[in-house]
Amino acid sequence: MGRWKPDARGRLERAAYELFLDRGYDQTTVEDIAKRAGLTQRTFFRHYADKREVLFGGAGALQAELLAALDRVSPELPAIEAVRLAVEAMAAFMDVQRELARERRRIIATHADLQERELIKRAALTAALAQGLQRRGVPEPAASLAADIGVAVFFVAFARWVTGEAARELVDAVREGFDQLKAVAAGASA
Amino acid sequence: MGRWKPDARGRLERAAYELFLDRGYDQTTVEDIAKRAGLTQRTFFRHYADKREVLFGGAGALQAELLAALDRVSPELPAIEAVRLAVEAMAAFMDVQRELARERRRIIATHADLQERELIKRAALTAALAQGLQRRGVPEPAASLAADIGVAVFFVAFARWVTGEAARELVDAVREGFDQLKAVAAGASA
C-alpha cells in the first residue's frame, strides 16, 4: 500500500507552481513536476492532460461553486443581486495565494495559447451563469447581461486584487467591484 | 491596365460568403473564392491571410470606428454614456446584412478555433475601449468595467438582432440593450 499518496492532485499543483516560479513555465516538464511531487508521470496524467491544464484545472470546480451558490440565493432577488451573491461566494470559495495568482497571470500573459484558453474558460463561465439565471426564470436579455456583467466585475476585481490595487481579500475586492459597477452603470463616474 | 479591379476586398468577401452559404465553410477553398470573385489567389492573399480571415477581416475597422466615435464624445459625459454613444456609432457604422451575420454566426458556432478567434477579437475590442476611456481620464476600475459592460451589451444586442429577437436595425437593438443594462444593473429585473 506504499504507493497510496493522499492529495496527489494538490501536490502536483503545488510542485508545478514551485517549478514555474523557480525555473519558468517553458523550462518545466511534466517529468520535473511529477518528480518534485514525489509521484510518477502516470499519476500526473491521471489528473492533468498536460502541464497547461495545471493552470486551468480549477475552472470546473469554480464554475460548480458559482452555480451551487446561485441555487442557494433566494429566487425573490433581482438577477444582478443573485449574481453578486453567487460571484462573492465563488470568490470566498477560492483559496488562492496572491503570489501564485500573480505568477499564473504572468505566465498566461506571455503565452498566446494560454490567453486563448483563459478567454474560453471565461466565456464558458459566463454562459453557465446565464443558463443558471435562465433556469431561475430570468428572461433574456437580462440573464445574459447580468451574467456578462457579473463575470466582468469578478475578473476586473481579481486583476486588481492580484496586483495589489484592491482589497487584501479577494471577496472584498469583488464586493467593491459590484459597488463600483452600480456607480458606473448609473453614470456616476465621469 | 485591364488587371485593375475596383474593391477587390469587398468582392472577395461577398464571393466568400456566397460560397460559405452555398456549399459550406469547410468545402470552400481560397481558389474557389478567388475564382468566384474573378480575381487571382495572389490577390486574395494580398487582402486576407486565409479564408478564416474573411470572417474576421472587419474587426480592425470596427475597433477604429469605436475609438474614433469615443473621441468625438464630449469629455463631460460619464464613462458609461460615452461608451453607449461610441458603441451605438459603431453599430450604425456596421453595414451588415442580417442573413450574412447569421451565416457567419453559424459557421463560427461549429468551429472551435473560430470561436476562440471571436473571443480574442472581443477581448481586444474591450481592451482598446478601456484604454480609450483611460486616455479620457476615466480612472480604474471604472474604465475597465464600463468597457466590459459596453462590449457585453453590444454582443448581447448583436446576437438578439441576428436571431431576429431584437429590433430590425442593429443600432436600435444596441440602444435597447443599454436601456436593459440600466434596468439590470439597478436591480429592476427579477
Image (tube, coloured by chain):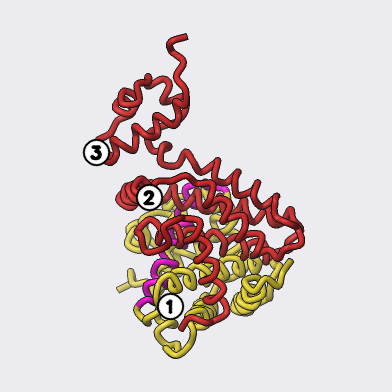
Chain colours: A yellow, B red
**Residue at 64% in and 56% down:** B130
Give the labeled residue for mark 2: B98
Q: Amino acid at mark 2?
A: Arg
Give A32 or B27, whichever is nearer the viewer.
B27
Q: Is residue A140 magenta?
A: no
**Residue underneath mark 3:** B22
Mark 2 belongs to chain: B
Magenta residue check for A132: yes
Q: Are marks 2 and 1 in contact (CB under 8 Å)?
A: no
- Same chain for mark 3 and mark 1? The answer is no
Q: Position of residue B107 (x, y in %)?
A: 32, 47
Residue B127: x %, y % from top left: 60, 53
Depth order, front residue of B9/B119: B9
What residue sits 36% from the left and 46% below the top?
B104
Please state the extent of the stretch shown in magenta in the rendering: A110-134
Mark 3 Cα-neighbour bin, 10 Å: few <14, some 14–19, many ≥20: few
Q: Which residue occupies 44% across, 67% down?
A: A126
Residue occupied by mark 1 = A65
Look at label 1 and name its amino acid: Glu
The quadrant where residue B39 appears: top left
Crowding near the residue tagged with mark 2, few <14, some 14–19, many ≥20 C-alpha atoms within 10 Å: some
